[in-house]
Amino acid sequence: MAAKCWKRKRLKLVFVKLFFMKSNDELVEYLRQHGWLKSERVTRAFKNVDRALFVPRELKEYAYEDMPLPILHGQTISQPLVVAVSLEALDVFPGMRVLEVGAGSGYQAALLSEIVGKNGVVYSVERIPELCEYARERLAKWLNVIVIHGDGSKGLPDKAPFDRIIVTAACPKIPKPLVQQLKPGGKMIAPVEAVFGQELLLIEKGTDGSGRVESQSLLPVAFVPLIGEHGFNEKQFTE
Ligand code: SAM
């Protein structure tokens, strides 16, 4: 009985191992074949940025799996599928000014950097100082990314306006300062609390100067919380 059980366990392990993706190219191919990666420029960025560089050393063997992974301080590097859907919907072009809220590992900032190119700039705000360091070390060769320590729920008024904004932590509602700092016609991606769980929203600001936005839901998601003045109160998660 015990031998049978062990055999079954071993079979399960072999099965899981067989389906592990072993390289960044395999991960990109998987995202492309399933239709999550669509455009040439986002696919190229995924090819040029090796996810393993942004994953902690002890988790490298899972770097090419389509799953979020822990980094530091209970935070995560997001699931590749969610990053692909976000970047495709954000519709980023070379030369754009982009704000990312929640640098985390720095992975998504590197992808954005590849897309905006040398004439564009990516500001990435992170509230945890150790993660700012973690991201900066890994982003050393992406010269158009600036990692800033602070509360990204307030945006970066002195660097605004932005063509695109992407929030990578769950918001109770769309943060007003971020909408204000978006250019007319600009686009923003943010995971926002919904009746059941969270929805990844694509938010588009009108071009008429009224500041009105329209939003559409792309995907149900599960992000860590946005902690800050226009996010959640930290006490809600520590008590
Ligand atoms: N974009 C990241 C990546 O590619 O690895 C993943 C980000 S992780 C899912 C969310 C990050 O948002 C965490 O690092 C967390 O510390 C950060 N965060 C939460 N609230 C924040 C705030 N108000 N301002 C800036 N960063 C915040």
Image (tube, rainbow, N blue to C red):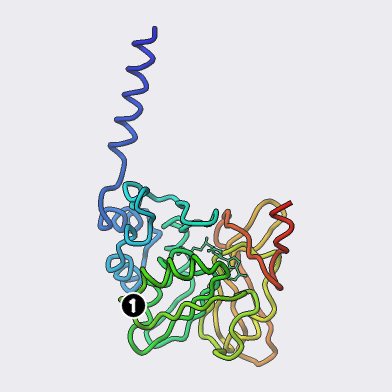
Q: Is residue 132 above or below residue 81?
A: below
Number of numbered discs visible in the structure rendering? 1
Determine the residue positioned at 38% across, 83% down: 144
Q: How busy is the neighbourhood of tag 1: few (under 14 within 10 Å), some, or many (20 plus)?
A: some
Q: What residue type is labelled 1?
A: Trp
Comparing 9 with 125, the one in front is 125
On the rendered structure, is 231 left or right of 110? Answer: right
Residue 50 in percent (x, y) is at: 30, 62
Most distant residue in the top direction: 1
Determine the residue positioned at 66% across, 92% down: 209
- Quadrant in the rendering for residue 1: top left
- Quadrant in the rendering for residue 81: bottom left
Ligand 1 under 8 Å from disc 1 Cβ: no
Determine the residue positioned at 57% across, 57% down: 223
Comparing 239 with 178, the one in front is 239
Residue 184 in percent (x, y) is at: 59, 89
Residue 29 in percent (x, y) is at: 28, 56
As helix, strand or loop, the secondary structure at mark 1 comes to: loop
On the rendered structure, is 56 left or right of 238? Answer: left
Q: Is residue 94 above or below residue 112?
A: below
On the rendered structure, is 23 left or right of 204? Answer: left
Task: Read off the residue under disc 1.
Answer: 142
| Quarter of image, ligand 1 | bottom right
Residue 3 in percent (x, y) is at: 34, 11
Determine the residue positioned at 73% across, 58% down: 235
